[in-house]
Amino acid sequence: MPHCIVEYSSNLEPTGRIGALLEKIAAHFRTAPEVFPTGGVRVRAIPVSHYVIADGNPEHAYVNVTCRIGAGRPADFRKAFFTQAFEIVTEHFAEETARRGLGITFYVDQADPEGSWKTNSIHAHMAKA
């Protein structure tokens, strides 16, 4: 972990540079490998083609980022780190925000260690590279 899912209205496809946003988010997580091991970073996007936003204006758009992390990271670290992550997202969409209605939300969930199972050989394969 972390796993970050960027859900967005499909009307952002032509101009939202979603791939670049995913790279920026992943790069931010790589700045803290002692807290978020690089081999566990997963950032992905899901376009949503059926939605209604606010008053129904088809020009409006939305982005919802949900990051799930393992439990145990200190609250002060989470606050600072994810404030920066939210700023990365809002800066990425600054031009979109200036030209259309765009709602951006960002949530952080902590996985319950008793309800989380995983396996990951990426760490070992990264060490071989």
Image (cartoon, grey):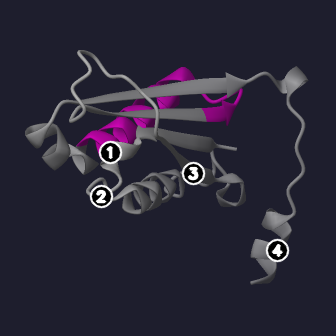
- Looking at marks 2 and 4 on the same chain, the residue that comes earlier in the sequence is marked by 2
Question: Is residue 40 toward the left or the right of residue 61 in the image?
Answer: right
Q: Nearer the viewer, mark 1 or mark 4?
A: 1
How many neighbours does mark 2 have within 10 angstroms: few (below 14), some (14-19), or many (20 or more)?
few
To which residue does mark 3 refer? Answer: 44
Amino acid identity at mark 1: Asn
Residue 92 in percent (x, y) is at 27, 50
Badge nearest the viewer, 3 or 1: 1
Tell me which amino acid carries mark 4: His
Residue position marked by numbered label 2 in the rendering = 14
What residue does disc 4 label?
A: 125
Relative to 65, residue 55 above or below: above
Please check the rendered image and state whether residue 85 is part of the magenta-colored stretch, yes or no: yes
Which type of secondary structure does the marked residue at label 4 adopt? helix
In magenta segment, residue 126: no
Q: Which of the two discs, 3 and 2, sits closer to the camera?
A: 2
**Magenta-tinted stretch:** 68-90
The alpha-carbon separation of the residues under discs 3 and 2 comes to 18 Å
> Dividing the image into 4 quarters, which one contains the C terminus?
bottom right
Quarter of the figure with residue 57: top left
